[in-house]
Image: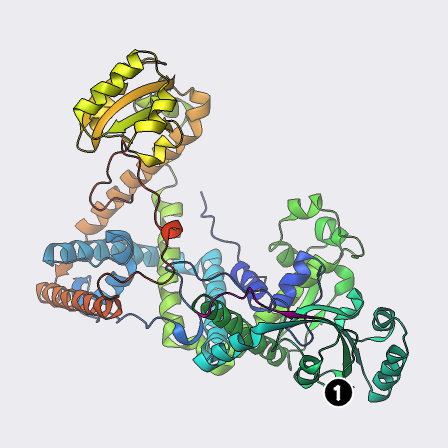
Amino acid sequence: MKSKLPQSTSRGIPAAIAGLFLALFPSQAVLAAGPATAPQAAGQSPAASQAPEAPQAGQPTLGPTAAPAEVPPPPIVLAVVNGTELTFDVAYETFLASHTGHGVLVRGADAVRELAGRLVERELFLMEAETLGVPAERDVVDVIASYHDQVASDVYWTSEVQDKVVVTDGDVESFYDKTDVALGLTLIVTATQAEALALRLRAEAGEDMAQLARSASIHESRNFDGALTLVRRGELFRGLEGPAFQLSEPGSLTEVVAVETGFAFARLDQRSINTDRPPREKALPQIRGILVERAQKKLAADLEARLLEGGAVEIDEAALTRENLLEGPDGKSIVARAFGESLSLDELRAGLDLEKLRAAEPAPGQSGTETGVLLAKQWVRGRGLVAAARRSGVFESPEVLRRVNSFRRDVLLKTLCDNYVWPDCEPSEAELFKYYEERASSEFTSPLEVRLAYIVVPSLEEARAVRARLDGGEDFEKLAREVSKDAASAMHGGRIGWVKPGELLPPVEAALQGLPKGGLDGPIETAEGCFLLRVLDRKEPMRIPYERARRAAEAALIKLRHQEAYNTWAKALRERAEVQLVEEGVQQAVAWLDQEAQRRADSAARRAKPLGEKPAGHDAAAAPAPRPAGSRPAAEGEKP
C-alpha cells in the first residue's frame, strides 16, 4: 500500500500558495467572488471602506503591535543515538505543544527524560526511513520541494509586506479626527484636462451628471453613475479631497484638479455629519486595523508589480475555458509559463474542485475562462515569489531551512509508517464485526439522555415547601420562574434541555437513573443548593446497529492496530540501537525550562492590569454565561 502524500505541486499550483495569494492580493479575491456590487471611493483599495472586525482574543496583531517572538531553546544534547546527537531545541519544537497542551512548559527531570525518550524513538524511525531509501521516493521529493517553495514565499512576502507596515498612533488619531464628516459625491475622471473642463461646463449648464459619468468617466464608479456614497477623509484622491470637503451646498461642483489617474471634478450630493461615530477608545483599534490593511494592500500591489517584471509570463487564456478545464482531452498541454517554468492543464486542475465547478453555472456576462485564468495568474505570482525568494537569499535562510527540515522529518515518518509499518493493518469484515461485538455494550451503545427541568433553592426547608406545592398541583414551570435561584434555567421554566451522563452533579445524576418520563423527584441536597427534578422526556440507552457503527469501529480498530505495529517497530529498532541518555543535558534543560517559566511569569505580570481594573471592553454581555446550577463543575485542567 503506497503512501498518499499531498498532491505534488512543485511545478503545479501549491494549494497554500493559491490561498495565500487570494488573501494577499484582494483584487483577485474580488474577481473570484464575482463583480462588485457597490462603488468604492476614488483612489481607495477594494476593501478599505469597510472596517475589519476587531481581532479575536488570542489572535496575533499585524504591524507594529505584534507580540515579540519567544526565546528559542538552546541546543543542549539530551541523548546520543548511533553516534547522532539529539538536542533539546529539536525536542522542544517537535513535542512540547502536543506533550503538555498549548503553550504549557514541561517541568522537572522526569518530564525532560520522557521528552528525550520520545525524541530517541522518533530519530530511530527517521534513521530507518533513510536506510530504506524513503527520502529518494519521487512523491517525497516533490512534496518537500513544494513545501520549501511555499515557506520561502511566505517568509519573503512577510518581509516585503507585513514587516514593512508602519502605522503610528498619530496616523490612527488623525484618521479618527477625520471621521466626523462624510460626503455623498458624483465623480467624473478623464484622461485629459480639456475633457474634464468640457464635461464640467456641461454639468454646470444642467446636463445630467450621472449620464455624463456613465458615458465619459474613466473611473470605475461610472458603473454606478459616478456615485460615491459617504466618503470620508483619506478615501478620495489626494488632489480632490481638499476641494470636495470645502463644498457645503448640495449640487455645487469642485474645480477640475489633477489626480493620480488623470483629471477629476466632483459634485456634492450630500454632506453628512457623523453624530453616531463610536467613541475614541472603541474606534481606534478598528481604525488601526483599517490602516494596516490599506498599507499591506499597497505594499502587496507594489510587490506584485515587481514580481512580474522580467518573468517572461505567458498565459494561454484561450485554453482555459470552462469546457477545457472540465473535459479537455490533453491534460499535458501547457497553459502558462513564467520564470522558466511551465504549468500544464492537469497541474492547474489539481487546484480546482472540479465537481463544484461542474455544478456551478458561469455568472451572467462571464465567458467561462475566469476561474482558469485566475488560477493561472495565482500560479504565476507564486513562481514570482519563489524566484524572488531565491534571488534574495530567503530560500536558504536559517528560518526557512529549519521549517523545511521539520516538515521533511514529518513526511519521512508518515511515508515510512504508511508504506512499511502499517501496510497490513486493514481488518477483514469478520475481524471488524468481532471488534464491534466485543465492545457493543460500551463503545457502540448510545448513552441515556434525559430532557430535564429543575428548581433550585438554597435550603432543604424551602425545597420541602416547594415540593409540597408541586404535590398539591401547582405548575412546575410557573414555580420555577417564581422561586428558582438558578437564573439561567428559571427564565425557561426550569428547563435545561437534554443531558447525558457526566454532565450533572453526581447526586442529581443518580436520582435520574430510575426516574420515568414525567417523574418528579426531590429535594436533593448538593453543595450548590437543593434540587427538585422533573423528567420531561427520556432516550434510553440503545445499541447502535453494526451498519451505522461500522465506520467508527473500523477507524478505532485501525488506530489500535497502527499503535500496536508502531510499538513493535519501536521495540525492534531500540533493541538494535546504541542509545545513551546525557544526564548533564537533562539537568541543563530543566534549568532552562525553569528560567523560561520565570521569564513568562514576569512578562505576564508586567502586562497585567492593576488589581480590580476591568479589561477594555468588559461588560455584562461579554462575560461568560453562568453555568447551570446542576451541571458538574469542570475538573482541574479541564476545559469548561
Q: Position of residue 390 (x, y in %)?
A: 50, 78
Q: Quadrant of the N terminus?
A: top left
Q: Position of residue 181 (x, y in %)?
A: 61, 73
The correct choice, above or below, for 163 with respect to 368 in the image is below
Left or right: residue 76 versus residue 214 is left
Which residue carries the number 1 mark? 257
Image quadrant in which you'd find residue 344: bottom right
Residue 559 on the magenta segment: no
Range of magenta residues: 271-280
The correct choice, above or below, for 101 with respect to 263 in the image is above
Viewer-closest of 191 and 586: 191
Image quadrant in which you'd find residue 197: bottom right
Judging from the image, the colouring scheme is rainbow
Viewer-closest of 403 and 234: 234
Left or right: residue 118 versus residue 256 is left
Q: Secondary structure at mark 1?
A: strand
Residue at (23% x, 19% y) in the render: 465
Q: Is residue 343 visible?
A: no
User: Magenta span: helix, strand or loop, mainly?
Assistant: loop
